[in-house]
Amino acid sequence: MKKILLGTIFGAVVGLGMAVQVSGPIVAQENDRVKTTYEQLDLFGDIFERIRSTYVEEVDDVQLIEAAINGMLTSLDPHSSYLPPEDYGDMQTETRGEFGGLGIEVTQEDGFVKIVSPMDDTPADRAGLESGDFVTHIDGESVLGLTLDEAVDLMRGEVGEEIVLTIFREGMDEPFDVTIVRDIIKLTAVKVRTEGRAVVVRITSFTEKTYSNLVEGIAEEVEANGGVDNIDGFVIDLRNNPGGLLSQAISVSDAFLEAGEIVSTRGRDEADSDRFNAQPGDLAEGKPIVVLINGGSASASEIVAGALQDHHRAIVVGTKSFGKGSVQTIMPIQDGGAMRLTTARYYTPSGRSIQALGVTPDILVEQRPSVEDPEDEEGQARTRRSEADLRGSLNNDSLTDEEREQLEEERAEQEEVAARRDDDYQLAYGLDILRGLNVLGN
């Protein structure tokens, strides 16, 4: 016993001695780091004064400092930036679901403005802009050399005014111009409708109203269908949804999960990490779910898709999502503006980060372009001939009038689904999956 105790004391003493010896270099390194920082701040002040006194034109001190702050933030990653008071106010308005503009979510890549996604039923959407398009010029002015905020400022303007965007689209030889008229953007965060025997939930963005709109929309549609027993399942359409509020993504995921982790966030310090779990209750009442995603599905959309996929609660259909796996915190600052700073990465329930990788769908389905049917009417008529068209064919006497009517209704529904494939192939594919799952279940 004494030997153990003595050994412990001796170890502690030796350890203390080492700590005293090592602490000297550590303190010296810290002092050097602080000295270097102050020297760099002195350098900044020197350059600032030289610009004020010798630049070819008089400069605005406030704009110069704001540009320096924004440059410092944007050097970190594409999503960190400085928000002047006016921009901060615009951002708060956007999260409430109504604002003026074009209706596009953008990021910056290779010096150009890249469209993450056009929002549904907005000027950008109606003008035909697509996820992945690059904006090279705004009203004839090149965006090269501009920060993302500066480019966004150029796209802002009075409602009713025209703006010309020069677009480069992959697969096309030359850029082309698109003229768009600015408008008030009123986002309906959630639109719910019935397609056949499936309820389609289109979520366009994650604003303050998303979860409440989701609950109300599903309740109304289920009631209109005479109850959930008359529904094959749900399609959650997250295509071209650029994301939004983390809290809303968590609430939407929770709406379809009975239990388990939804998402975890991990910052630089362990204290900044968090984990969010689902509470009992499933709006779909256990019915099958298909989630649609594409390259325009980003951030909060990817949290929902990843959570439902990892819990095997939904089949994810479409193409790989955008891959934004970071969390930004909006920090108000003293001038009335704010700082948007990346403070954490988020991880799906299985512990995977989708940063720069995206959510990979369970079933890869490209969106097919709509094509004209090459067959003429005579050719279509030939392909549709059957036994019933033959002269003198026997009648089917095994069906009652009620069964025959039901069969005709089922055929009409199948033809409607088939016709939808030309209009929205990914949605039609998702509906086909729900129909197949329902047949197996019955």
Image (cartoon, rainbow, N blue to C red):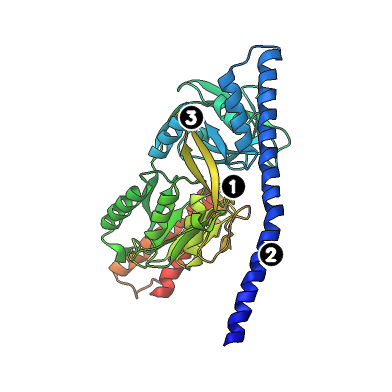
Residue at the (46%, 45%) spot, across then down:
244
Relative to 93, does residue 226 appear above or below in the rendering?
below
**Residue type at numbered disc 2:** Met
> Which image quadrant is residue 437 in?
bottom left
Q: What element carries label 2?
A: helix
Q: Distance between the residues labelled 1 and 2?
A: 71 Å
**In the picture, which quadrant includes the N terminus?**
bottom right
Image check: 226 left or right of 83?
A: left
The tag earlier along the polypeptide, 3 or 2, is 2
Image spot of residue 11 (x, y percent): 64, 74
The tag earlier along the polypeptide, 1 or 2, is 2
Q: Name the residue under label 2.
A: 18
Taking the image as drawn, is residue 325 in sight? yes
Image spot of residue 160 (x, y percent): 46, 21
Figure label count: 3
Image check: 109 left or right of 121?
A: right
**Residue type at numbered disc 3:** Asp
Q: Distance between the residues labelled 3 and 2?
A: 54 Å
**In the picture, which quadrant includes the C terminus?**
bottom left
Q: How far apart are marks 1 and 3 (CA)?
A: 38 Å
Front in this rendered view, residue 243 or 264: 264
Q: Mark 1 points at which residue?
A: 369
Residue at the (58%, 19%) spot, across then down:
61
Q: Mark 3 points at which residue?
A: 87
Crowding at mark 2 (Cα within 10 Å: few <14, some 14-19, many 20+): few
Relative to 291, does residue 396 appear above or below in the rendering?
below
